Amino acid sequence: PFFRYFLSCGKPGVVEGERYKRTPEIVDEFDQNLVHIPSEGRCYTFKCWDQLTREDIPDVVIFFARPVAVSLYNVTEETRQLAMAMLAIGAVTMLGTTYHAACFTGINRGAGDSRFVFVVDMICGWLIVLPLTFLAAFVLQWPLPIVFLFTRIDQCFKWLIALLRLRGDKWIRNVTRA
């Protein structure tokens, strides 16, 4: 029921608007002109990423939905295999991403520990991810899935940094005004 607001200006306190269309009424008009094809047999329900819950386990969904997602496209066998490998890497590394992103973005920054998050992101990005990706792609000329893994390699250990930081008390800052 809030899709018309999601695509347009939003509804305060309910849903943020993406502003693809100017008003909810324009979204309604657009929707009325769409050809709705009834589904016969199996069908798939898609959820907005921010509506997924812990029970949905999005990384597991992505991992096991790879064949379905890739089958939606008419691609060569080589492209299908690359897509399957890269979706698998993305799904597995997402396990680390979901934990450390919540810790770093929500907890650490919210508690005034943004400097630590900045330093970790800069070290991981500039001293680990970029050099390894450059070496894998241009010097060693490794296959695309391995190069893609190196672009996500920091996701495999940043969760551990986040966990260790939260177990101590150095991240806690007084962010209230005196």
Image (spheres, helix red, strand yellow):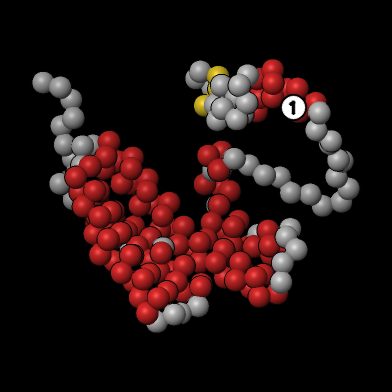
As drawn, is 31 to the left or to the right of 35? left
User: Under tag 1, what secondary structure?
Assistant: helix
Q: Is 52 drawn above or below residue 161 in the view shown? A: above
Most foreground residue, 154 or 148: 148
What residue does disc 1 label? 30
The x, y position of residue 6, in whole percent, is 59, 28
The x, y position of residue 21, in whole percent, is 62, 26
Q: Is residue 68 visible?
A: no
Q: For the residue marked with disc 1, what is the amino acid?
A: Phe
For this orientation, the residue located farthest to the left is: 178
Query: Which quadrant, please, contains the C terminus?
Result: top left
Mark 1 neighbour density, 10 Å: few (under 14) some (14–19) many (20 or more): few
Q: Is 69 drawn above or below residue 110 in the view shown? A: below
Q: Residue at x 55, y 22 (%)?
A: 10
Most foreground residue, 103 or 75: 75
Q: Residue at x 63, y 19 (%)?
A: 23
As drawn, is 29 to the left or to the right of 155? right
For this orientation, the residue located farthest to the bottom is: 140
Q: Residue at x 41, y 63 (%)?
A: 152
Occupied quadrant, residue 64: bottom right
